């Protein structure tokens, strides 16, 4: 097994809701340790892409492989594959009736049948790494938005996933909370985690990404290293999109 | 008001309260059980059964308990199904209560955001694990204020039991008024005994509602 | 005849008698609902008043209605007033008094709920636009409140109709009583009539109440997504 083996492979993915085509003939290959940021206007299909990878959406045609196993909706293997994928959503995905610690340990204990003491020990370790060890017995509603998202990241990490998916995790946060969450993600990237990130935070994308994918209307328009993409985008659509983040007096 | 009359009739009322409480709470417990089962069938969209349950709910939510009791108590025996007045009372309360409890619990289940089950699924949980660890506990706690309101409603509904000649509080009061002309005393005792039966439940309900509304999880 | 009582419906003017019995209950509920909605608007507004005395009185009123079965209230008004005040209130009037007393509290609570559900910023932004207090209520608050209230008050009608079945217990001849009389009068020729006849009453109530609940549900759904 080489260090840079392929962890995620998508071939000719086609996804539609009825008449409405979301993703057209989409291809992607992600190597272990890569950090990929997907950007594009709202409705371009980037969130749907993450949901397809996790088997939360059915697909019309094409193939998705995670660690060489095909992702097929309704198959028994899906539960096993999902353990290899950690996903963090926009918001409200912590279980409100459980403490932080219970949120994190539930799946490792019930799905992976790991020992409670060991899981708790690991959970507390991960929590202290994101500066939240003292919150382990708090309930989600007692946490700030930024803290909730960091717990959600820890919850996903505790399953030892091969790849982490982030679906606009800071979009619902107050501006002052955004930084702490992005910082956590940066540290995660530095530790060598494979990550697939959907975000609107451009300077963050530039700092964290190995590769930028630009999607528009369900198609991959441009793919480039971050410096290249942000300084000299090749396509008009990408140029136009990047201009929407700039302001000037007319 | 004649206190001697009250002292004299107190035992009768206590006996009647016992009967009302017994029938009332048996009916309530059974209706919660029935409601949970029906709501689960609706939630998992069990074929055929869910249609039957939907019809049952509409029928019993849109008719008065008194009419249901008349049908059960006077109508069913004509088909050869003979039940005692007590069984009939419990059955009637369970059926009407079950339809209300189902609605309450169903709306509790549907109040849970889909992101909850999605994030649980993305952690690799199986569907039944998602339901028992994530959806069900939240749905039950959301439904508790509704359950309390239903319980109070059902306890009040027990007041029609005298129509099928159960010797409950209303029956006792009516006897005292009709046969002995002790109207004031009869009504006084009636109010006092219903207060005894309902005030604690009502206070508990208000307390729980406040807790659920303001504190949710975590205090 | 082994039709379980259905044959009695066609005998003489039995069915018509049952319908007019049902109308007695429906008539009492309609009068009570109309009175309740009118009075409930006032009571609901009173409930939001910050005056301690009014608040306490309203709480007490709500609590009485919440706890006391309508049957008990009916007994108090129907039997009690005669004894205490020496006035003999007719059964139908006492029913209307009791159901209005109950309905007003229910309606008032709905109105209160609707009023406090309008977020503060609605008032504030209306004022910021320079609308007067009256204009704010008229153009901003009231339309939003009504959208919440109308489905709920329609729902109150079905609850009222179901509750009026109780009036037979204070001797009003409504559909259940009429049906009992018909069954009694024909017990020789149709000994099993109770099954079909009470099933008919059951369905009569259902046919009256179901469309009203459907309408209320429909409006609630349609108006909930603003």
Image (cartoon, helix red, strand yellow):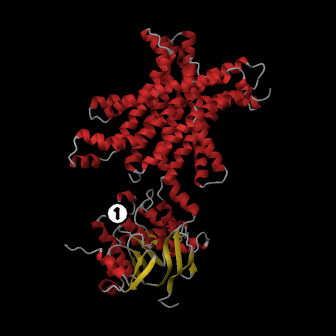
B216 lies above or below A108: above
Q: Position of A52 compared to C12: left or right?
A: left
**SS at badge 1:** helix
Chain under numbered label 1? A
* Percent x, y of residue B70: 65, 28
Q: Position of B104 compared to A144: left or right?
A: right
Confirm whether residue A158 shows in the render: no
Q: Which residue is mark 1?
A: A145
> Where is residue A61, by image quadrant?
bottom right
A82 lies above or below B59: below
Q: Residues within 10 Å of mark 1 (few under 14, many from 20)?
A: many
* Percent x, y of residue A42: 39, 70
Residue lying farthest to the right in this orientation: C1
* Percent x, y of residue C32: 46, 26
Residue drawn at point x = 51 percent, y = 49 percent: B107
Residue drawn at point x = 50 percent, y = 62 percent: B117
Q: Nearer the viewer, residue B109 or C141?
A: C141
């Amino acid at each position: 097994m080489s260090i840079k083996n392929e962890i995620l492979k998508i071939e000719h993915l086609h996804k539609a809701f009825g008449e409405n085509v979301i993703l057209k003939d989409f291809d992607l290959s992600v190597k272990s340790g890569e950090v990929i940021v997907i950007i594009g206007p709202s409705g371009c299909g980037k969130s749907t892409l993450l949901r397809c990878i996790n088997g939360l959406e059915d697909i019309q045609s094409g193939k998705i492989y995670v660690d060489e196993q095909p992702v097929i909706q309704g198959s028994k293997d899906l539960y096993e594959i999902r353990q290899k994928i950690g996903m963090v959503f926009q918001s409200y995905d912590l279980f409100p009736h459980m403490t932080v610690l219970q949120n994190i340990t539930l799946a490792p204990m019930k799905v992976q049948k790991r020992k409670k003491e060991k899981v708790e020990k690991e959970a507390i370790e991960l929590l202290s790494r994101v500066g939240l060890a003292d919150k382990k017995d708090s309930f989600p509603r007692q946490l700030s938005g930024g803290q909730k998202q960091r717990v959600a990241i820890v919850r996903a990490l505790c399953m030892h996933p091969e790849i982490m998916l982030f679906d606009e995790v800071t979009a619902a946060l107050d501006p002052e909370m955004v930084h702490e969450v992005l910082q956590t993600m940066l540290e995660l990237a530095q530790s060598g985690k494979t990550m697939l990130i959907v975000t609107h935070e451009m300077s963050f994308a530039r700092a964290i990404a190995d590769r930028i994918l630009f999607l528009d209307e369900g198609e991959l328009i441009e793919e480039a290293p971050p410096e290249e993409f942000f300084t000299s985008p090749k396509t008009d659509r990408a140029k136009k999109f990047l201009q929407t983040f700039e302001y000037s007096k007319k | 008001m004649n206190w001697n009359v009250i002292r004299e009739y107190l035992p009768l009322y206590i006996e009647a309260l016992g009967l009302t409480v017994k029938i009332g709470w048996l009916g309530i417990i059974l209706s919660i059980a029935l409601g949970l089962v029906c709501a689960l069938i609706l939630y998992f969209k069990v074929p055929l059964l869910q249609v039957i349950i939907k019809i049952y709910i509409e029928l019993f939510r849109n008719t008065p308990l008194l009419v249901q009791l008349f049908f059960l108590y006077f109508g069913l025996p004509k088909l050869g199904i003979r039940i005692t007045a007590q069984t009939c009372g419990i059955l009637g309360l369970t059926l009407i209560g079950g339809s209300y409890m189902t609605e309450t619990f169903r709306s509790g289940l549907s109040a849970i955001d889909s992101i909850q089950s999605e994030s649980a699924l993305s952690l690799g949980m199986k569907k039944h694990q998602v339901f028992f660890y994530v959806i069900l506990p939240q749905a039950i706690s959301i439904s508790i204020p509704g359950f309390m309101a239903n319980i109070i409603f059902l306890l009040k509904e027990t007041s029609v039991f005298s129509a099928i000649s159960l010797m409950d509080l209303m029956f006792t009061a009516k006897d005292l008024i009709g046969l002995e002309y002790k109207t004031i005393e009869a009504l006084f005792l009636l109010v006092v005994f219903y207060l005894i039966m309902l005030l604690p439940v009502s206070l508990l309900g208000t307390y729980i509602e406040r807790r659920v509304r303001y504190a949710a999880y975590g205090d | 005849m082994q039709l379980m009582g259905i044959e009695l419906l066609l005998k003489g003017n039995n069915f018509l008698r049952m319908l007019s019995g049902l109308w007695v209950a429906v008539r009492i509920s309609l009068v009570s609902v109309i009175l309740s909605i009118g009075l409930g608007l006032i009571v609901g507004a009173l409930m939001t008043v910050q005056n301690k005395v009014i608040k306490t009185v309203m709480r007490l009123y709500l609590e009485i209605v919440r706890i006391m079965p309508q049957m008990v209230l009916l007994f108090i008004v129907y039997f009690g007033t005669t004894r205490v005040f020496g006035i003999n209130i007719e059964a139908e009037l006492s029913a209307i008094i009791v159901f209005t007393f109950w309905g007003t509290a229910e309606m008032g609570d709905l109105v209160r709920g609707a009023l406090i559900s309008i977020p503060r910023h609605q008032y504030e932004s209306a004022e910021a636009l320079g609308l007067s207090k009256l204009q704010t209520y008229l153009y901003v608050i009231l339309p939003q409140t009504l959208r919440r209230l109308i489905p709920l008050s329609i729902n109150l009608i079905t609850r009222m109709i179901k509750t009026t079945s109780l009036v037979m217990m204070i001797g009003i001849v409504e559909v259940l009583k009429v049906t009992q009389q018909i069954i009694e009068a024909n017990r020789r020729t149709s000994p099993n009539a109770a099954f079909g006849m009470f099933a008919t009453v059951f369905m009569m109530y259902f046919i009256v109440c179901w469309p009203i609940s459907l309408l209320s549900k429909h409006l609630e759904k349609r108006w909930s997504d603003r």
